[in-house]
Amino acid sequence: MAIGYRTLGSTVSAIVFLCVPIVMAGQFGTPKDDEGTRIFKAEEHPSYSGQFHLTGQQAFLIGSMNDRSPWDHMDYAGKRLQSVQGTINIDVDERTNSGHVIAEFTEGPDRYRIVMDRFAAKAPFQDGGIATRIYEHGDSGNGDPLYPKTWLYLGGWGTATVFKNGDVLYKDYDAHFMVMERSRDPQTHEVRYPVKRSLPGGETDPAGMEIDLWVRSKEQNTNNFPPFEIFVHLCWEEVTWRSVGK
């Protein structure tokens, strides 16, 4: 009787073992139709929350808040970056295009605070004002070519107000933030752009990450680069993804 029991148990176990892969094959880990390993949109993930909470540290100001025209606030050569004390906190909902971005930094005796809390799209790729998992700049076909083509983990477009020592300095200026691949050499801070390249990827480094924030006036000034009367450019080289509520 004992032998029969063991034989029956082994037979049942074998049947269950053989059946499990057949049941699971159509549900888990099997490409459906032609989807393969393409890059999926965020909303194609069943658990996507749309909530992003990030902090940037180790800040650099490109140029100075006190620069007089002509100036270069892109500084591909990395010669006009100055390290400043400050952070950026991003707390947004990509699905509803809402939330806020707050950057604070000091330059000399002056304290600056940038508040970006209104998001709106001017192009389809901006997805209502906040977008994730897209390419922008360079030869991507999205946005201007001021920066190399880069993968945006998160990007936002809208307006921001800049405060200096508690008073409004620039109100409702166009603004753009990017959580992006590293654009600058970690040693020289040079942006290797534009360069002739044979590979399709942009001139950024996918092994690193940074946050950039641009605030610019509507008024133009072709003596400056970029050609705006005002263009504030900050970069944070250390990026932390925070849990909700922290």
Image (cartoon, rainbow, N blue to C red):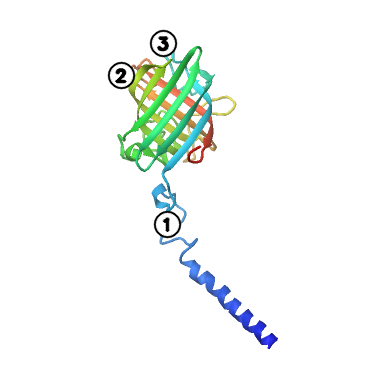
Label 3: how many Cα within 10 Å (few below 14, some 14–19, many 20+): few
**Looking at the rendering, in which quadrant would you find the N terminus?**
bottom right
Q: Can you tell which mark lies on residue 219?
A: 2
- Sooner in the amino-acid sequence: mark 3 or mark 1: 1
Q: Secondary structure at mark 1?
A: loop
Q: Check the image and report above or below for 232 versus 239.
A: above
Q: Label 1 near label 3: C-beta < 8 Å?
A: no
Expressed as whole percent of the image width and height from the top left, the position of residue 51 reads 43, 42
Spatial separation of the CA atoms under disc 3 and disc 1: 53 Å
**Residue furthest toward the front?**
245
Instruction: Identify which residue is drawn at 42% across, 21% down.
Output: 232
Question: Which amino acid type is marked by label 1?
Answer: Glu
Q: Amino acid at mark 2?
A: Glu
Name the residue at 65% across, 84% down.
5
Mark 2 and mark 1 lie on one chain; the one further toward the N terminus is 1
Q: Which mark is residue 68?
A: 3
Looking at the image, do the residues carrying marks 2 and 3 touch, with CB atoms under 8 Å apart?
A: no
Identify the amino acid type marked 3: Arg
Please tell me which of labels 2 and 3 falls first in the chain.
3
The residue that label 1 is drawn on is 35
